[in-house]
């Protein structure tokens, strides 16, 4: 998961939903896609590795189910996970505890729990008279309902794509959750350009070629002695480089995924300074 900034709706098409009903529908679509993929997975493939480092198919479903169950009030588990190489932060360690707490279950039982959690979450958002500004528990503490929904859509859609690539079931690249994910990645572009070493005063553009299309520019500025990435409209002529990615590639790179199998590799094209474009690609990951 990533605690990204406010979504930049104007630069993505189709535009992500901005109302509670639309966000709840986007959540339900991607969460039920994970459920369908889990239920369709043969039991002998539950241990297949996925593009998310250190996680197999079971872990992908367990991650979504355990987090949603926690948001519904289930106490966090106390599980000794040791020191897995793929866990790089306290947040990652906590997420790993949630996943490992499900290891004694079958994939079928886990999917039953996930279905129940989805039903309860969707019913909560649709029938409780909430507004986008109401506050409720989220991955990073109390937050607005709108932010919780958009973060969960991004996270669950990312794991949906992990499962699709592992199980050979492509899809979901033009869904509302995909638009939300692309918007949140665009919102994090300021962090990416600073990490990539784009010089102060220089700008870059990242274009999305589809199925979700978009465009976002970012300039590096020095503010109070610190480097900041400022999101703004940038023309091709003024950009140090224009990096072009597909929806799949931007989602995979932003989530720090590794290429696998026939779907492996995250191709990109660029104009302008190719070294800068390569640096952007190398530093695109924004999730823990």
Image: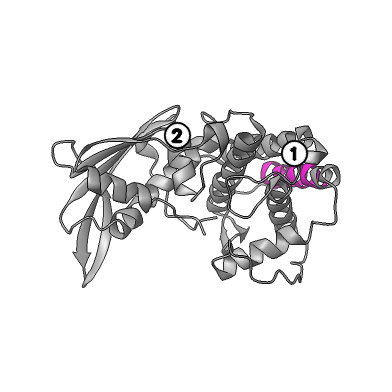
* Secondary structure category for the residue under label 2: helix
- Disc 2 from disc 1: Cα separation: 23 Å
In the image: residue 26, left or right of residue 11 = right
Q: Which residue, given by chain and number where applicable, does mark 2 sit on?
A: 247
User: Could you tell me residue 66's position as x and y percent?
Assistant: 73, 55
User: Could you tell me residue 116's position as x and y percent?
Assistant: 81, 44
- Residue pictured at 77% horizontal, 45% vertical: 114
Name the chief secondary structure element in magenta: helix
Q: Quadrant of residue 192?
A: bottom left
**Can residue 16 be seen in this snapshot?**
no
Q: Which residues are magenta?
A: 113-128
Q: Which mark is residue 38?
A: 1
In the image: residue 270, left or right of residue 5 = left
* Secondary structure category for the residue under label 1: helix
In the image: residue 68, left or right of residue 139 = right
The answer to which of 226 and 42 lies nearer the viewer is 42
User: Could you tell me residue 150's position as x and y percent?
Assistant: 54, 47
Q: Is residue 133 above or below residue 178?
A: below
């Amino acid at each position: 998961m990533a605690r990204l900034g406010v979504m930049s709706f104007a630069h993505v098409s189709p535009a992500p939903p901005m109302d509670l009903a639309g966000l709840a529908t986007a959540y339900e679509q991607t969460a039920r896609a994970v459920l369908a993929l889990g239920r369709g997975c043969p039991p002998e493939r539950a241990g297949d590795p996925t593009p998310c480092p250190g996680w197999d198919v079971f872990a992908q479903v367990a991650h979504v189910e355990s987090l949603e169950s926690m948001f519904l009030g289930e106490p966090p588990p106390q599980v000794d996970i040791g020191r897995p190489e793929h866990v790089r932060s306290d947040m990652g360690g906590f997420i790993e505890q949630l996943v490992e707490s499900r290891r004694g279950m079958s994939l079928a039982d886990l999917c039953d729990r996930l279905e129940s959690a989805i039903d309860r979450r969707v019913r909560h958002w649709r029938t409780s008279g909430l507004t986008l500004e109401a506050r409720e528990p989220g991955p990073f503490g109390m937050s607005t309902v709108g932010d919780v929904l958009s973060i969960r859509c991004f996270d669950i859609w990312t794991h949906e794509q992990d499962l699709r690539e592992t199980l050979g079931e492509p899809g979901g690249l033009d869904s509302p959750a995909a638009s939300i994910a692309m918007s949140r990645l665009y919102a994090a572009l300021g962090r990416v350009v600073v990490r990539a070493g784009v010089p102060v005063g220089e700008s870059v553009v990242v274009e999305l070629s589809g199925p979700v299309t978009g465009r976002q520019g970012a300039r590096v500025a020095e503010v109070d002695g610190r480097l900041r990435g400022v999101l703004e409209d940038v023309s091709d002529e003024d950009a140090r480089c224009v990096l072009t990615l597909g929806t799949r590639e931007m989602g995979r790179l932003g989530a720090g995924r590794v290429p696998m199998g026939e779907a492996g590799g995250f191709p990109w094209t660029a104009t302008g300074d190719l070294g800068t474009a390569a640096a952007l690609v190398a530093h695109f990951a924004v999730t823990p």
